[in-house]
Amino acid sequence: MKNILQERLNAKTVIFDGAMGTELYKHNFFVNVSYENLCLTAPKAVQEIHQAYKDAGAEVLTTNSYGANFANLSKFGLGDKVAEINTASVQLARKIAGDAIIVAGSIGPVDIADDINAVEMLSQQLKALLNANADFIIFETTGKKRDIARILETAENYGDFPYVLSCVFDIEGNLKDGTCAEDIFKMIEQSAVKPTAFGMNCGLGPDEMLNSFEKIVKICPLPIIVQPNAGLPKNVGGRTIAMCSPEYFTTYAMRYLALGAKGIGGCCGTNPADIADMARSINPLAKAQSNKNIFASVEENPGVEAKNFADRSSFAAKLAAKQWVCNIEIVPPQGYALENTIAKAIQCREAGFDAINIPDGPRASSRISAIATSCLIQQQSGIETILHQCCRDKNLIGMQSDLLGCAALGINNILFITGDPPKLGDYPFASGVFDIDSIGLIKIQNRLNHGLDLIGKPIPTPTAAVIGAGADPNAIDMEREIRRTREKIEAGAEYIVTQPVFDPDALLRFIDNVPELQTIPVIAGIWPLASLRNAEFMKNEVPGVTVPDHVIERMSRGKTKDEQLDSGIAIAKESIEKIRHAVAGVQISAPFGKVEIAIRVIR
């Protein structure tokens, strides 16, 4: 049997659908009927739900057969219809799926004590689904070691076929009966017919499941498919709020993607709106990760020798001479008037900063062109800029054009980042392009520096960019961050700028874990906290930033905003002193655009 699921998981992160029961309930089918039997009695309703998920962007449709086993159907007097219902469930999904979408045959646990009869019931359902041409089987909501053993025995009895073993974990990464993930993987390893992928579904909302996912992803030998519930009520400021909006669901879906999930969908309570919102954000990012190898098809051509690093800019000359560099980040304004920004740049130059770091639409905001801002600052302020170039807004052709434009304008210091998806900003309906990620964009700039364009065609004059990349010393998935940092250096990155550092020890550990960072300069991001509220926002709302509890506690000691600001500046200065021996310089942010705060840090 062809393993289409394996092919899809190898190619990209796959979007699964959401809950079936939630949607059937909305169609006025209440819990006193067999939802699985609706495949026979109300096929139009089932198909409408499949269609809604297809329209939302789901790439896997799951059959309405979760409880279509003999034990469960017998409760409704339908024990003789196991084969008929399972067959119909596949046929209904297949009519909507067509050729592009794959169909997962859903099988839930058999809730009886007798193992032999349970395996027989699972086998009966399995054969019906596969005979009806389901592309793979997903054994869902498996909550006990006993149920896992039954599934593995059923698989071995049937023979080789693609399937997913999906379990219900608690927040610590254990099953309901206390079985830990390590024991599950040992059982899988000993099985003759192993699953194509491993799943986590139901039981927890997106936030809670993230905790167990972080533990399991590090030890799981298989691709992981994550399908949390819509969300659980939380106490927020004394109010009980149901955290279950599409935006909430998508925020966590992107975190699963960043941590390495190969399939993402929803379970109880999720709906087509959740899947649609998630698909719009995840698909572009997944595409960027899968397109890293587009350069493999380009015939290798070393091009000409790149311009000497120290001669490309004043910033590069200081790095080459191993002199301490001190940069400041200033966000471009939302309008087009740059007089105030240029005045701040002059103030920073006079204060002794070496360069102005210019973000490109941070947090997916719409601001004046970062290139235009950089150009006018350099022309009118007498200080160099470090331009962020992100992959979100333009395709490969447009990005290469921008890089050539930067060379023409003398903007030679460039920091390459993947960029925040539009969903994080004020324009969530905007498209994210993400033809490639920052690693691919670094490769393009490196080619241009050697006189070659994206496809290896010579250009008349090589560019002279100083190629930078970002890194996150506080990443949840540290193995992935270390790997990607190495890939960025291999692609051509010549210096690294980190996310804001509030825990100096975390940065030092990160540098030690990436030997390549001994060969290129590391510039540490420093964010002087302006207030306790600012610290709490950074801790809870800004991806890639970790603010330790002891920092929050220290900020809270200030009784006034001025006292809190003094503490924030003191923390920033102390961090610089602790890391000074290990880095080439610092990049200081200006909270709320107040460059005076950053200037106080370097003084």
Image (tube, rainbow, N blue to C red):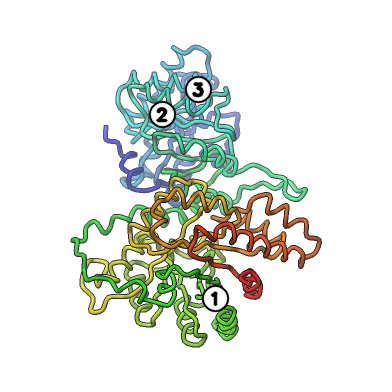
Label of residue 86 in the image: 2
Label of residue 73 in the image: 3
Q: Which residue carries the number 1 mark?
A: 353
Instruction: Name the outermost residue toward the bottom.
Output: 380
On the question of residue 28 being in view, the answer is: no
- 14 in relation to 418, above or below: above
Q: Nearer the viewer, residue 82 or 464?
A: 464
The span from disc 3 to disc 2 (Cα, nearest Å) is 11 Å
Q: Nearer the viewer, mark 3 or mark 1?
A: 1
**Mark 1 residue crowding within 10 angstroms, few (<14) / some (14–19) / many (20+):** many
Quadrant of the frame with the C terminus: bottom right
Q: Position of residue 252 (x, y in %)?
A: 54, 49
**364 relative to 90 in the view: left or right:** right
Q: Secondary structure at mark 3?
A: helix
Q: Position of residue 160 (x, y in %)?
A: 30, 26
Kindly identify the amino acid type of the residue bearing the numbered disc 3: Leu
First along the sequence among labels 2 and 1? 2
Q: Secondary structure at mark 2?
A: helix
First along the sequence among labels 3 and 1? 3
Quadrant of the frame with the N terminus: top left
**496 relative to 268 in the view: left or right:** left
Kindly identify the amino acid type of the residue bearing the numbered disc 1: Phe
